Amino acid sequence: MQSEDLFNFQKLTPDQLSFFEENGYLIIKGVLKHEGLKQIQTECMEAWRKEKESFDPNKSWLQNALLVNIHHQAPTVRKYYFEGPLVEIASAIIGPNVKGATSQLTFKMKGNTKPFGWHQDNGYGELEPYNALTTLTALDDTDRGNGCLWLIPGSHKAGQIRVEQNVDQKQSQSEIIVNADDKLAIPMEIKAGDGLIFNCWMLHKSDGNMSENRDRRILFLRYADADAVEVYNDRKPRLGKLVKGKTKFAEVEAFEADL
């Protein structure tokens, strides 16, 4: 099946770009077509069931909610990640040279009532230049009842928030939680197939899934400048597939080139 049958390709308008620059986020309606949503749901759940069980309060947030490198297991996700509409959307914000920086499932299945505190995505994986883009594609209708995301419009303007962690905390991938004013937050209630994009410095959180019969499944894809480096890792280049343009790093150019 062709990409055009699965995804809605679109370019950001000047008004959308202006809104993103001012507020740090943007909701993009219907980025997945019906068939694309169905295929991604099916492939992601097959991968999820191979590795995950039902929510266990004794497990870490990583074990309960994340499945990394989902594009290795789900061909439609891989097509969406590498060739789908998000690539051009990312390029409009980041620039002409773009690589994929992260792909993962971020699921809050029914029973997972654990909240996830205020943080910046660049707090977990600080990349420079500071123009990395988080994209969340909803695989379920997502609202306050099943643990939707909350964010603070304009909070990206404060820049990188430094959170001190010791070696043990970093190795255990413990949560990074920063202080924020809940009264400034707004819920990101979106429909299955919609996309949410936001700046790497955007403050955001999510509550627990309080629904008894609804999951909250999100496909998390992050894009970065093709020459972005990991500040926390001796400024080595972040490895990720080059999806648009060129890079000065041979290791980035070669990374997943066969996928």
Image (tube, grey):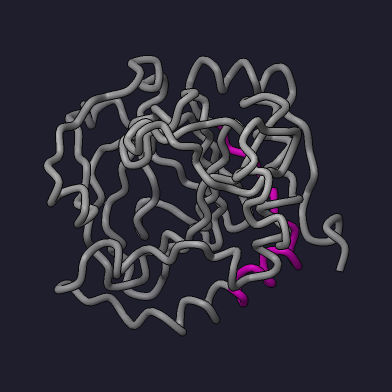
| In the image, residue 29 lies in the stretch drawn in magenta | yes
Residue at the image point whose x is 48% and y is 21% from the top: 23
Q: Quadrant of residue 138?
A: bottom right
Residue at the image point whose x is 19% and y is 33% from the top: 178
In the picture, which quadrant includes the N terminus? bottom right
Residue at the image point whose x is 67% and y is 61% from the top: 78
In the picture, which quadrant includes the C terminus? bottom right
Residue at the image point whose x is 37% and y is 79% from the top: 52
Report if residue 151 is visible in the image: no
Q: Is residue 78 left or right of residue 154?
A: right
Q: Quadrant of residue 63?
A: bottom left
Indicate whether 58 appears above or below 193.
Answer: below
Question: Residue 190 at what x, y percent from top left?
Answer: 53, 48
Depth check, front residue: 257 or 47: 257
| In the image, residue 184 lies in the stretch drawn in magenta | no
Residue at the far front in the pictured view: 250
Q: Which residues are magenta?
A: 26-43
Question: Residue 243 at what x, y percent from top left?
Answer: 71, 44
Depth check, front residue: 141 or 16: 16
Depth check, front residue: 167 or 192: 167
